[in-house]
Image (spheres, grey):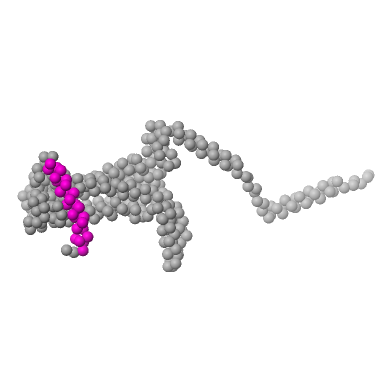
Amino acid sequence: MDLLQTLLWPLKWAVELILVAWHWFFTAIGIPAGSGLVWVLSIVGLVLLVRSALIPLFVKQIKSQRKMMEIAPELKKVQEKYRGKKDQLSREAMSRETMALYKKHGTSPVSGCLPLLVQMPIFFALFNVLNGVTLAAQENRGGVGLLSPELVQQFYNAKLFGVASLHDSLQGAWQTRPEGWEATVAILVVLVILMIASQFFTQLQIISKNLSPEAKTGQAYQMQKIMLYVLPLAFIFSGVFFPLGVVIYWFVSNLWTMGQQFVVIRNMPTPGSDAAKDREERLARKGKALDAKGKIIPMAKYEAEQQKMFEDAERLAAEKPKRQQPVGKQRSKKQSGQSGQSGSGNQAGNGPKNKP
């Protein structure tokens, strides 16, 4: 067993446990144990369980992104401070100040990638489990955990709609051309198209509605626009080489992501984005608004808070002592000269008058 398989072994065991548990549940409610439907539903159940477990990390990701937006001006100041300085000491100092800023606000760039970093090993474990079904079935053995030899044979022989084997890939079906290979190819092509469409729509929603005006001016925004068209091409590769069971997992996971992003954009939009403005308009139509902390409050309370803030600002401005305008040297000399001339004139005017 190589290092990768050793590292994936606990995850493969967990994946098999979840698949077998869902298989038992769906079999208990009357779905035939050897049907393709029961295994497809088990894969869907795996997606739902994994993505539900990742919801706390996803919420943390959203909060981390918000904090990164808040500290963006401070980060820019640090970068401007060390702009053009390429010596080792300056680089280390900039790194220390940046990390101190992250620590102060309790965030980091890695926090935004946590859901993806956690999900990828699970995906690879599922790929290994489904990809190893063929070899395990041929050797009449089970998986690494609860996937017994009997269940392996059931999964190997299971066919979606009675024609498409879950362990077949588009490439394998095209090369070997077993019975019903046309249906397998057609199902995989349709799934790949739907995966590309769902990924494109999800990214388009983020770029078009959930970015602030400041975010649309940076280089990262241009990269996002490029990835909008490049990233879906990865699904073409997956659709060609990955087993049908893995493609189904990926497609259902994409649907979850699309729905999740819809909920976030509608209810937790990025401040200053078009989605945030739309939300404020929807709340206003219902007689509600958002306070400074982002909580929904009645419009009357919001207007009262705004009026109080305005009055407090006016009071502070009135109480603030007026600053005396400084007088420049030239202006001071000029005023002194005029004062002197005025004084001389007055003395001349007030002097004794000659009698005629």
Quadrant hosting residue 241: bottom left
Q: Which residue is painted at 25% across and 54% down in the image?
A: 120
- Residue 248 in magenta? no
- Residue 355 placed where, x, y %? 93, 45
Q: Which residue is painted at 11% across and 46% down in the image?
A: 36
- Residue 279 placed where, x, y %? 37, 38
Residue 56 falls left or right of residue 177: right
- Residue occupying the far right of the picture: 356
Task: Give the prevailing secondary structure in the magenta stretch.
Answer: helix
Q: Which residue is painted at 31% across and 53% down in the image?
A: 114
Q: Which residues are magenta?
A: 3-28
Residue nearest the observer in this picture, 148 or 255: 148
Residue 20 falls left or right of residue 97: left
Quadrant position of the N terminus in the picture: bottom left
Quadrant position of the C terminus in the picture: top right
Residue nearest the observer in this picture, 203 or 99: 99
332 shown above or below 308: below
Q: Is residue 197 visible?
A: no
- Residue 12 in magenta? yes
Residue 168 falls left or right of residue 95: left
- Residue 347 placed where, x, y %? 84, 48
Residue 65 falls left or right of residue 308: left
Residue nearest the observer in this picture, 195 or 73: 73
- Residue occupying the far bottom of the picture: 88
